[in-house]
Image (tube, helix red, strand yellow):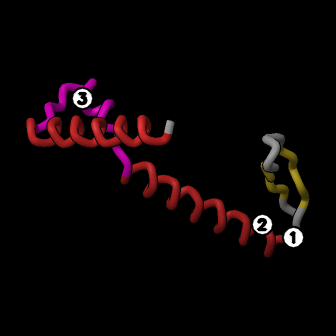
Amino acid sequence: MPLITYKFADGHSEEIEVSDEVAAAFAQLEKYEKKVERKETRRHVSLNLLMKNGFETLEEYEEYLDFLEMKRAKKRDFEM
């Protein structure tokens, strides 16, 4: 019987002996989760990271960010 390494929600891992069918399903599930995780992390890029690496933003975009920050500040002042 094959062993799988199962990681619990609290962070610890244990090796569990399972049947061949369960091991195959578990391997398939892990492969799918890795693909989804890769897709999700590739989709999001931090603007701060881009700027740190030399990416320059457009002036209109910077003006828009200033506008958003001004709106957030007004909202914070209103909520107080």
Main SS of the magenta part reads loop
| 33 left or right of 3 in image | left
Compared to 6, does 12 lie above or below?
above
Q: CA distance from mark 1 to mark 2?
A: 6 Å
Picture quarter containing residue 46? top left
Per the rendered image, the range of residues in magenta is 44-58
Tell me if residue 27 comes above or below residue 67 in the rendering: below
Question: Does the CB distance between marks 1 and 2 fall below 8 Å?
Answer: yes
Q: Which residue is mark 3?
A: 51
Residue 44 lies, in percent from the top left, at 37, 48
Depth check: 22 or 40 in front?
40
In the picture shown, does residue 26 fall above or below 5? below
Residue 63 among magenta residues: no
Q: Amino acid at mark 1?
A: Ser
Q: CA distance from mark 2 to mark 3?
A: 45 Å
Q: Is residue 45 left or right of residue 31?
A: left
Circle 3: is it few (<14), some (14-19), or many (20+) Cα within 10 Å?
few
